[in-house]
Amino acid sequence: MKVAVVGATGLVGSEILTVLAERNFPVTELIPVASERSKGKEIEFKGKKYKIVTPAEAITLQPDVALFSAGGGTSTEYAPQYAEAGITVVDNSSAWRMDPTKKLVVPEVNGDVLSKDDKIIANPNCSTTQMVVVLQPLHAKYKIKRVVVSTYQSVTGTGVKAVNQLMDERAGKDGEKAYPYPIDLNVIPHIDVFQDNGYTKEEMKMIQETNKILGDDSIRVTATTVRIPVMGGHSESVNIEFENDFDLAEVRQLLTEQEGVIVVDDPANLKYPMPKDAHGKDEVLVGRIRRDESQDKTLNLWVVADNLRKGAATNAVQIAELLAKKGLI
Ligand code: A2P
């Protein structure tokens, strides 16, 4: 299969290359795509070197599938052109996620919605993806009424510039800033731009995308998204109120059985999920599983995943794998 990776030089793009190689996706030809600045440079994939081309050039090379991770602007401009040329796009930006004509997919959760008419498929926001993988089996069993989530998000979610800012600050060096404040030894309760309602766009993404992926607008979600000086992954404190009561042992069982989830929950032995442990893994780790004793039928969870993996690259590659399995690419 001819596979284009748009944004191949970025943090998510390079993770996509790693995941494609690791999972042995049947790539017969790789087309690495980046901006004019990177055109002509070489990228290595599975021991072979490939020259970087621009998004427009890649269309003429007719890949079967294009995995986009080069920001919303590039996706808005080029995804329709790729689709028009018969190239299926899996898009990691927020450009198409809430478009009612586009599917928003986490394969373990709603992979069944994909059909041959889908030419641009949206990959959800990283914080949403790791949460819905955990919510889905619980929603199916107990019906979720409301979710209150607070996130502790890695700087890798912002991109190379943010990682450099953290490293520069640690080394006491001046450099480019991705954030309006220092991130080292700090916590910034602000991810993406503020909206008129006082929420940030990241928070609104978590709310709207959760409803869309779980296919249930009756689930009420509220979110506070926070950037912390961490590299390995995003963490989330998730409080879930259900319609029906649950049994904690059964909750553990459901989560243990959920594809793509690993339960790490043994407080007696100080075992709980941390970004250090999630780093480099495709699975979502869940722990601190306990009743919310302040309210009936309510559960507390701690959910951690590598935001560049399940939150971005892995999920995009899994969508491509599913498309291939269904014969849609
Ligand atoms: P480039 O390296 O040429 O700038 P990150 O979010 O980690 O910084 O990565 C952004 C990715 O998106 C990079 O691969 C970057 O390529 C790519 N990119 C940014 N702007 C464009 C554009 N206008 N066309 C194609 N790729 C782009």
Image (spheres, rainbow, N blue to C red):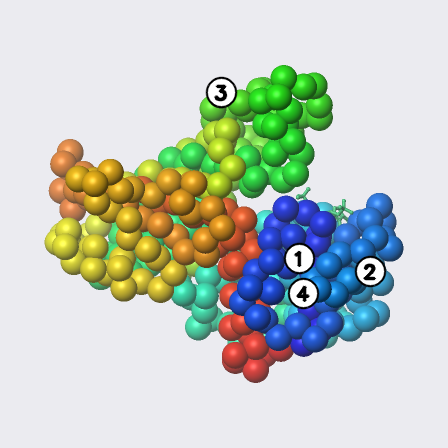
Residue located 51% across and 73% down the image: 322
Which structural element holds mark 2?
strand
Residue 196 at x, y percent in the picture:
53, 31
Question: What's the amino acid at mark 4?
Answer: Lys
Whole-percent x, y for residue 183 in the image: 55, 24
Figure check: 152 above or below 88: above
Three-letter residue code for mark 3: Leu
The image shows residue 23 at horizontal and vertical percentages of: 54, 67
Residue 185: mark in rendering: 3
Relative height, residue 114 to residue 158 (above, below): below
Instruction: Give whichever of discs 4 and 3 has the lower sequence position.
Output: 4
Category of crowding for the residue at label 3, using alpha-carbon neighbours closer than 10 angstroms: few (below 14), some (14–19), many (at least 20): few
Whole-angstrom CA distance, mark 4 to mark 3, is: 38 Å
Q: Nearer the viewer, residue 156 or 108?
A: 156
Residue at numbered disc 4: 46
Q: Residue furthest bottom?
A: 327
- Residue at screen point 45% across, 69% down: 111
**Quadrant of the snapshot with the N terminus:** bottom right
Q: Earlier in the sequence, mark 4 or mark 1?
A: 4
Q: Name the residue under label 2.
A: 51
The numbered disc on residue 68 is 1
